[in-house]
Image (cartoon, coloured by chain):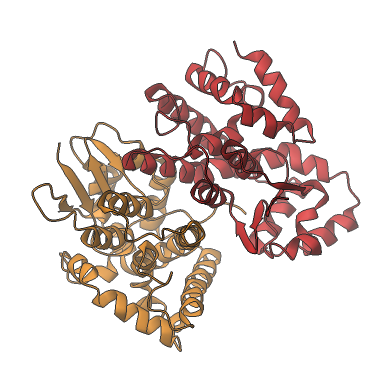
């Protein structure tokens, strides 16, 4: 059966996976993985046909991210999908050394657990909530009807009704700024990429921060290493090919409900 | 003497993961028991090892590693012994997916319930001033909030209800998963089994309305298979509280 990558606009987790796919080379050749663009904010991800195993789609911690379908099984969570692609291709985007690999996993976890929910919250409020608010009640009900996860569905409702609490706003700004600080500190020794060699951490981090530059510019002020790194990642051919898949021409402004903000502790 | 030291609490939830992974790999380590209920994890000696004050932590030579699931991956990568990740890339993806689902979605709900019925009542017996000072020493603000809630018993009914919903759903999803394969995410014993076993080993006792011989036969078969591993018996023998004592109770209850 065909292997298909369903992806949103190349931002956030969709950008990370599309870039990893291009780096892997698995997007070319006779057995190439086919890419299909879907509109995450239209709920398209919950209407993918032909799936036989939907657990990872239904209950993805990441929320509305890309879905790799292999033999009917929906695979989600951008870091793990990127790891899968990399491992099938021979593993150039993950450190071989056990400690360096642990460092990359820890980095990615800080991004997906702390920065991603914050960026999704700020991005969606600035550049997604209006679209949902403008929908009719019936259209919105149709959109969310197939969403299996109750907590993810609640995040859709919160977005539509404009439930963006001040405390979450303050917390999210601090977490995005914290991620930028982390990047700046990591690059201060003059390295080109976050882990030394190019890795999945670069794409995952870039995906979540790219759209924050316009929304939270103060977090990026006087961060010369981060600015140079953002430009370096953007210039990478794999990222350019991912960005070229944008249907809107403004991928950095495309958001959909993401991971939930930590419930406690 | 081993150049590995593991700082851990009970063989339960996060602490149990690297304990069991090291034991499965046959890697000798120095055990440093951190009494979480005495707030050892926020005392200067431990903060010198892990400034965030979270447990477990592991030192390997001069390297310091934190975060239980990531430590397990390090242990599997760094040492010889049985491979605790499947050979197939799609199986490995599934193992990682389940570990994240447990660590970030289901685990915090187990934990909230566990803290409200076990950790909170245990520490509330202590002197209030001593408790207040202990909380002030916690480095991470999120953990300060969590401990205050646990100690004051101030989890809201809505958040406890949401945690109970997630626990019930998580158990149902795990039951379905173990009907598809022998182990979590693959047909071989892996880090996902270690991860999830550490939060579910006492389910028939802690959630009798949701798990047991009749309600979740697949989970019970899996629990028994994992319980019978030598590394599990050795690891559970390192426990000092009633949590580890549950091991024998569960074994008696499984056919």
Which residue does the image show at 79% across and 47% down from the upper left? B35
Dividing the picture into quadrants, the one containing residue B243 is top right
Residue B19 vertical position relative to residue A248 in the rendered view, above or below: above
Q: Position of residue A190 (x, y in %)?
A: 44, 84
From the rendered image, report the letter of the chain displayed in orange.
A
Q: Position of residue A204 (x, y in %)?
A: 37, 63
Q: Is residue A147 visible?
A: no
In this rendering, would A225 be left or right of A86? right
Q: Position of residue A222 (x, y in %)?
A: 46, 89
The total number of labels drawn is 0
Q: Position of residue B48 (x, y in %)?
A: 74, 66
> Where the C terminus of chain B falls, by quadrant?
top right
In the figure, the shade used to draw chain B is red
In this rendering, would B119 be left or right of A199? right
In this rendering, would A48 be left or right of B41? left
Dividing the picture into quadrants, the one containing residue A70 is top left
The residue closer to the viewer here, B220 or A151, is: B220
Determine the residue located farthest toward the front in the rendered image.
Answer: B1
Which residue does the image show at 66% across and 51% down from the upper left? B56
Which residue does the image show at 21% across and 35% down from the upper left? A71
The residue closer to the viewer here, A150 or A114, is: A114
The residue closer to the viewer here, A148 or B204, is: B204
Determine the residue located farthest toward the left in the rendered image.
Answer: A30
Determine the residue located farthest toward the top in the rendered image.
Answer: B255
Q: Is residue A169 visible?
A: yes
The residue closer to the viewer here, B5 or A163, is: B5
């Amino acid at each position: 059966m065909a292997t298909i990558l369903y992806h949103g606009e190349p931002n956030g987790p969709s950008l990370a996976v599309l870039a990893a796919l291009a780096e892997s080379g698995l997007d070319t050749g006779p057995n190439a993985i086919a890419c299909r663009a879907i509109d995450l904010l239209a709920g398209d991800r919950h209407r993918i046909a032909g799936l036989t195993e939907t657990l990872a789609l239904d209950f993805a911690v990441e929320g509305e991210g890309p879905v790799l379908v292999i033999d009917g099984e929906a695979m989600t969570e951008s870091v793990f999908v990127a790891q899968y692609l990399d491992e099938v291709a021979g593993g150039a985007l993950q450190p071989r050394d056990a400690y360096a690999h642990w460092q990359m996993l820890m980095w990615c976890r800080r991004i997906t657990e702390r920065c991603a929910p914050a960026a999704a919250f700020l991005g969606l409020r600035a550049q997604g909530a209006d679209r949902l608010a403008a929908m009719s009640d019936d259209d919105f009900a149709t959109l969310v009807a197939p969403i299996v996860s109750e907590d993810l569905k609640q995040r859709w409702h919160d977005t539509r009704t404009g439930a963006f609490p001040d405390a979450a706003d303050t917390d999210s700004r601090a977490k995005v700024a914290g991620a930028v600080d982390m990047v700046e500190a990591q690059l201060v020794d003059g390295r080109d990429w976050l882990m030394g060699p190019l890795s999945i951490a670069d794409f995952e981090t870039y995906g979540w921060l790219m759209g924050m530059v316009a929304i939270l510019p103060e977090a990026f002020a006087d961060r010369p290493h981060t600015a140079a790194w953002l430009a370096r990642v953007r210039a990478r051919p794999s990222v350019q090919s991912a960005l070229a898949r944008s249907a809107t021409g403004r991928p950095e402004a495309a958001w959909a409900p993401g991971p939930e903000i930590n419930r406690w502790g | 003497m081993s150049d590995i030291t593991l700082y851990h609490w009970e063989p339960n939830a996060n602490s149990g993961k690297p304990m069991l992974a090291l034991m499965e790999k046959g890697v000798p380590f120095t055990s440093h028991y951190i009494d979480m209920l005495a707030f050892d994890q926020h005392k200067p000696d431990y903060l010198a090892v892990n400034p965030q004050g979270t447990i477990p932590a592991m030192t390997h030579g001069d390297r310091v590693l934190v975060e239980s699931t990531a430590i397990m991956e390090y242990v599997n990568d760094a040492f010889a012994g049985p491979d605790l990740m499947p050979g197939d890339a799609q199986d490995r993806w599934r193992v990682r997916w389940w570990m994240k689902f447990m660590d970030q979605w289901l685990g915090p709900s187990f934990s909230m319930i566990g803290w409200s019925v076990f950790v909170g009542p245990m520490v509330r017996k202590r002197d209030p001033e001593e408790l207040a000072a202990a909380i002030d020493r916690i480095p991470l603000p999120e953990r300060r909030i969590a401990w205050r809630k646990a100690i004051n018993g101030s989890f809201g009914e809505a958040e406890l209800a949401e945690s109970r919903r997630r626990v019930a759903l998580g158990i149902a999803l795990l039951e379905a998963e173990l009907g598809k394969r022998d182990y979590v995410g693959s047909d071989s014993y892996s880090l996902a089994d270690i991860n999830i076993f550490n939060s579910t080993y006492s389910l028939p006792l802690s959630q009798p309305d949701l798990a047991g011989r009749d309600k979740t036969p697949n989970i019970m078969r899996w629990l028994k298979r994992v319980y019978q591993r030598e590394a599990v018996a050795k690891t559970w023998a390192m426990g000092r509280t009633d949590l580890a004592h549950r091991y024998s109770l569960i074994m008696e209850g499984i056919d």
